[in-house]
Amino acid sequence: MTVGVLALQGSFNEHIAALRRLGVQGIEIRKAEQLLTVSSLIIPGGESTTMAKLAEYHNLFPALREFVKTGKPVWGTCAGLIFLADRAVGQKEGGQELVGGLDCTVHRNFFGSQIQSFEADISVPLLTSKEGGPETYRGVFIRAPAVLDVGPDVQVLAHYPVPSNKEDAVPETNVIVAVKQRNLLATAFHPELTADTRWHSYFMKMGKEVEEGASSSSSGTIVS
Ligand code: GLN
Protein backbone atom coordinates (compact mmCIF):
# COMPACT_ATOMS: atom_id res chain seq x y z
CA MET A 1 0.00 0.00 0.00
CA THR A 2 1.51 3.34 -1.03
CA VAL A 3 0.43 6.60 0.51
CA GLY A 4 0.67 9.81 -1.46
CA VAL A 5 1.52 12.99 0.42
CA LEU A 6 0.73 16.26 -1.34
CA ALA A 7 4.15 17.89 -1.47
CA LEU A 8 3.54 21.42 -2.69
CA GLN A 9 4.23 23.16 0.62
CA GLY A 10 4.05 22.54 4.36
CA SER A 11 4.81 19.52 6.52
CA PHE A 12 4.88 16.79 3.87
CA ASN A 13 8.37 15.55 4.91
CA GLU A 14 7.16 15.08 8.48
CA HIS A 15 4.21 12.97 7.28
CA ILE A 16 6.52 10.82 5.15
CA ALA A 17 8.81 10.35 8.18
CA ALA A 18 5.85 9.36 10.39
CA LEU A 19 4.73 6.82 7.77
CA ARG A 20 8.28 5.47 7.58
CA ARG A 21 8.21 4.86 11.34
CA LEU A 22 5.26 2.56 10.63
CA GLY A 23 7.12 0.84 7.81
CA VAL A 24 4.94 2.48 5.16
CA GLN A 25 6.23 4.20 2.04
CA GLY A 26 5.03 7.74 1.48
CA ILE A 27 5.28 9.21 -2.02
CA GLU A 28 5.58 12.94 -2.68
CA ILE A 29 2.76 14.10 -4.96
CA ARG A 30 3.27 17.17 -7.14
CA LYS A 31 1.59 16.18 -10.38
CA ALA A 32 -1.94 14.99 -11.16
CA GLU A 33 -0.80 11.76 -12.81
CA GLN A 34 1.10 10.72 -9.66
CA LEU A 35 -2.25 10.39 -7.89
CA LEU A 36 -3.00 7.37 -10.07
CA THR A 37 -0.13 5.49 -8.41
CA VAL A 38 -1.22 5.76 -4.77
CA SER A 39 -3.92 4.07 -2.71
CA SER A 40 -4.49 6.93 -0.27
CA LEU A 41 -3.55 10.57 0.12
CA ILE A 42 -2.46 12.90 2.91
CA ILE A 43 -2.86 16.66 2.48
CA PRO A 44 -0.46 18.19 5.03
CA GLY A 45 -0.54 21.30 7.16
CA GLY A 46 1.07 24.46 5.96
CA GLU A 47 -0.48 27.63 4.61
CA SER A 48 -3.65 26.88 2.75
CA THR A 49 -3.68 29.98 0.50
CA THR A 50 -0.14 29.30 -0.71
CA MET A 51 -0.90 25.61 -1.11
CA ALA A 52 -4.05 26.44 -3.10
CA LYS A 53 -2.11 28.79 -5.40
CA LEU A 54 0.47 26.09 -6.06
CA ALA A 55 -2.25 23.49 -6.64
CA GLU A 56 -3.92 25.84 -9.12
CA TYR A 57 -0.61 26.51 -10.85
CA HIS A 58 -0.03 22.76 -11.26
CA ASN A 59 -3.68 22.24 -12.29
CA LEU A 60 -4.13 19.74 -9.46
CA PHE A 61 -7.62 20.62 -8.23
CA PRO A 62 -9.59 18.48 -10.75
CA ALA A 63 -7.41 15.42 -9.99
CA LEU A 64 -7.65 15.99 -6.22
CA ARG A 65 -11.46 16.23 -6.43
CA GLU A 66 -11.51 13.09 -8.53
CA PHE A 67 -9.33 11.26 -5.97
CA VAL A 68 -11.69 12.25 -3.13
CA LYS A 69 -14.60 10.80 -5.14
CA THR A 70 -12.88 7.44 -5.72
CA GLY A 71 -13.52 6.48 -2.08
CA LYS A 72 -9.80 6.04 -1.39
CA PRO A 73 -8.79 7.42 2.02
CA VAL A 74 -7.79 11.08 2.16
CA TRP A 75 -6.54 12.72 5.35
CA GLY A 76 -6.19 16.47 5.71
CA THR A 77 -4.19 17.90 8.62
CA CYS A 78 -4.66 21.57 9.47
CA ALA A 79 -4.35 23.37 6.09
CA GLY A 80 -5.31 19.96 4.64
CA LEU A 81 -8.53 20.05 6.67
CA ILE A 82 -9.28 23.47 5.14
CA PHE A 83 -8.63 22.02 1.66
CA LEU A 84 -11.11 19.18 2.23
CA ALA A 85 -13.91 21.32 3.69
CA ASP A 86 -16.91 22.17 1.52
CA ARG A 87 -17.14 25.62 3.14
CA ALA A 88 -14.51 27.93 4.69
CA VAL A 89 -14.79 31.21 6.56
CA GLY A 90 -12.07 33.51 7.88
CA GLN A 91 -10.53 33.57 4.43
CA LYS A 92 -8.44 36.34 3.00
CA GLU A 93 -10.35 38.60 0.61
CA GLY A 94 -11.52 36.64 -2.42
CA GLY A 95 -11.10 33.36 -0.57
CA GLN A 96 -9.27 30.42 -2.06
CA GLU A 97 -10.10 27.35 -4.04
CA LEU A 98 -10.97 24.25 -2.00
CA VAL A 99 -10.96 20.58 -2.92
CA GLY A 100 -14.12 19.99 -0.88
CA GLY A 101 -15.94 16.73 -0.26
CA LEU A 102 -16.13 17.03 3.52
CA ASP A 103 -19.54 18.39 4.47
CA CYS A 104 -18.48 20.95 7.05
CA THR A 105 -17.72 24.62 7.54
CA VAL A 106 -14.20 25.37 8.67
CA HIS A 107 -12.84 28.58 10.20
CA ARG A 108 -9.38 28.98 8.69
CA ASN A 109 -7.70 30.64 11.66
CA PHE A 110 -10.11 29.90 14.46
CA PHE A 111 -7.40 29.77 17.14
CA GLY A 112 -5.63 32.93 15.97
CA SER A 113 -2.21 33.71 14.58
CA GLN A 114 1.17 31.97 14.84
CA ILE A 115 1.88 33.28 18.36
CA GLN A 116 -1.42 31.83 19.57
CA SER A 117 -0.30 28.35 18.54
CA PHE A 118 -0.41 25.83 21.38
CA GLU A 119 -0.28 22.19 22.43
CA ALA A 120 -3.05 20.55 24.40
CA ASP A 121 -4.16 17.13 25.55
CA ILE A 122 -7.45 16.28 23.92
CA SER A 123 -9.74 13.35 24.38
CA VAL A 124 -9.96 11.10 21.32
CA PRO A 125 -12.14 8.06 22.05
CA LEU A 126 -11.26 6.67 18.61
CA LEU A 127 -7.68 6.11 19.79
CA THR A 128 -8.64 4.49 23.07
CA SER A 129 -6.56 1.42 23.83
CA LYS A 130 -8.02 -2.06 24.01
CA GLU A 131 -7.77 -1.92 27.80
CA GLY A 132 -10.48 0.70 27.71
CA GLY A 133 -10.81 4.04 29.43
CA PRO A 134 -10.43 7.42 27.80
CA GLU A 135 -6.97 8.34 26.59
CA THR A 136 -5.69 11.74 25.76
CA TYR A 137 -3.85 12.75 22.66
CA ARG A 138 -1.28 15.58 22.56
CA GLY A 139 -2.53 17.90 19.82
CA VAL A 140 -0.18 20.42 18.23
CA PHE A 141 -2.26 23.39 17.06
CA ILE A 142 -0.41 25.83 14.77
CA ARG A 143 -2.47 28.77 13.46
CA ALA A 144 -5.11 26.12 13.71
CA PRO A 145 -8.49 26.00 12.05
CA ALA A 146 -11.62 24.56 13.70
CA VAL A 147 -14.77 23.01 12.33
CA LEU A 148 -17.82 25.20 12.97
CA ASP A 149 -20.56 22.89 11.75
CA VAL A 150 -20.89 19.45 10.20
CA GLY A 151 -23.40 17.75 7.92
CA PRO A 152 -25.32 14.60 8.90
CA ASP A 153 -22.78 12.16 7.43
CA VAL A 154 -19.84 13.59 9.35
CA GLN A 155 -18.61 11.92 12.54
CA VAL A 156 -17.02 14.14 15.14
CA LEU A 157 -13.89 12.43 16.48
CA ALA A 158 -12.52 15.08 18.85
CA HIS A 159 -13.30 18.42 20.45
CA TYR A 160 -11.14 21.08 22.04
CA PRO A 161 -12.65 22.92 25.02
CA VAL A 162 -12.28 26.61 24.18
CA PRO A 163 -11.24 28.61 27.27
CA SER A 164 -13.92 30.94 28.56
CA ASN A 165 -11.91 34.08 27.72
CA LYS A 166 -11.65 33.23 24.02
CA GLU A 167 -13.02 36.12 22.00
CA ASP A 168 -15.54 35.39 19.25
CA ALA A 169 -16.58 32.12 20.83
CA VAL A 170 -19.26 31.10 23.22
CA PRO A 171 -17.57 30.60 26.63
CA GLU A 172 -16.38 27.08 27.40
CA THR A 173 -17.65 25.65 24.20
CA ASN A 174 -16.22 22.47 22.77
CA VAL A 175 -15.10 23.18 19.24
CA ILE A 176 -14.67 20.36 16.74
CA VAL A 177 -11.06 19.57 15.86
CA ALA A 178 -11.22 16.12 14.22
CA VAL A 179 -13.83 14.64 11.89
CA LYS A 180 -14.44 11.74 9.54
CA GLN A 181 -16.82 11.32 6.64
CA ARG A 182 -16.59 7.93 4.93
CA ASN A 183 -13.13 7.96 3.26
CA LEU A 184 -12.24 11.44 4.48
CA LEU A 185 -10.38 12.09 7.73
CA ALA A 186 -9.48 15.59 8.91
CA THR A 187 -7.66 16.96 11.94
CA ALA A 188 -7.16 20.61 12.90
CA PHE A 189 -3.87 19.70 14.60
CA HIS A 190 -0.59 18.17 13.39
CA PRO A 191 -0.04 14.47 14.27
CA GLU A 192 2.97 14.46 11.94
CA LEU A 193 4.82 16.79 14.33
CA THR A 194 4.68 14.37 17.26
CA ALA A 195 6.29 10.98 17.90
CA ASP A 196 2.82 9.52 18.44
CA THR A 197 1.82 7.58 15.32
CA ARG A 198 -1.69 6.61 16.40
CA TRP A 199 -3.43 8.85 13.85
CA HIS A 200 -1.19 7.57 11.04
CA SER A 201 -1.93 4.00 12.14
CA TYR A 202 -5.64 4.73 12.10
CA PHE A 203 -5.34 6.20 8.59
CA MET A 204 -3.54 3.05 7.42
CA LYS A 205 -6.37 1.01 8.91
CA MET A 206 -8.85 3.03 6.82
CA GLY A 207 -6.75 2.14 3.76
CA LYS A 208 -6.76 -1.57 4.61
CA GLU A 209 -10.53 -1.54 5.00
CA VAL A 210 -10.97 0.04 1.58
CA GLU A 211 -8.60 -2.55 0.07
CA GLU A 212 -10.61 -5.32 1.69
CA GLY A 213 -13.79 -3.80 0.30
CA ALA A 214 -15.03 -3.06 3.79
CA SER A 215 -14.88 0.73 3.77
CA SER A 216 -18.44 0.98 5.03
CA SER A 217 -17.44 -0.69 8.29
CA SER A 218 -14.75 1.93 8.96
CA SER A 219 -16.96 3.88 11.29
CA GLY A 220 -14.67 4.78 14.19
CA THR A 221 -16.17 6.02 17.41
CA ILE A 222 -18.69 8.80 17.38
CA VAL A 223 -18.33 11.15 20.31
CA SER A 224 -21.18 13.51 19.62
N1 GLN B 1 -4.66 28.38 9.33
C1 GLN B 1 -3.68 28.01 8.35
C2 GLN B 1 -4.18 28.29 6.94
O1 GLN B 1 -5.08 28.93 6.72
C3 GLN B 1 -3.32 26.55 8.45
C4 GLN B 1 -2.26 26.37 9.49
C5 GLN B 1 -1.54 25.09 9.46
O2 GLN B 1 -1.68 24.26 8.54
N2 GLN B 1 -0.71 24.90 10.42
O3 GLN B 1 -3.60 27.87 6.02
Image: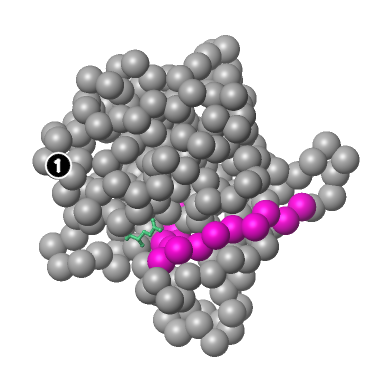
User: Do we see residue 155 in this rendering?
Assistant: yes
Q: Main secondary structure of the magenta part?
A: strand
Q: Between residue 105 and residue 136, name the one nearer to us.
A: 136
Q: Position of residue 63 (x, y in %)?
A: 23, 28
Q: Is residue 23 above or below residue 145?
A: above
- Residue at image point 70% right, 43% down: 127
- Residue at far top of view: 212
| Relative vertical location of residue 166 with respect to residue 208 in this rendering, above or below | below
Q: Is residue 94 left or right of residue 220?
A: left
Q: Quadrant of the C terminus?
A: bottom right
Instruction: Give the quadrant of ligand 1.
Output: bottom left
Q: Amino acid at mark 1?
A: Glu
**Which region shows up in magenta?**
135-150
Q: Is residue 203 left or right of residue 101?
A: right
Look at 14% across and 35% down and name the residue there. Answer: 58
What is the tally of numbered marks visible in this picture?
Answer: 1
Determine the secondary structure under disc 1.
helix
Q: Is residue 145 magenta?
A: yes
Q: Compared to 92, does 156 lie above or below?
A: above
Residue receiving disc 1: 56
| Of the pair 159 and 47, the residue shown nearer to us | 47
Residue 132's quadrant in the figure?
Answer: top right
Q: Position of residue 73 (x, y in %)?
A: 46, 29
Residue located at (38% from left, 20% from top): 38
Identity of the residue drawn at 60% across and 54% down:
158
What residue occupies the far right of the structure in this picture?
A: 131
Residue 130 in the image, given as x and y percentages of width and height? 83, 37
Residue 45 part of the magenta segment: no
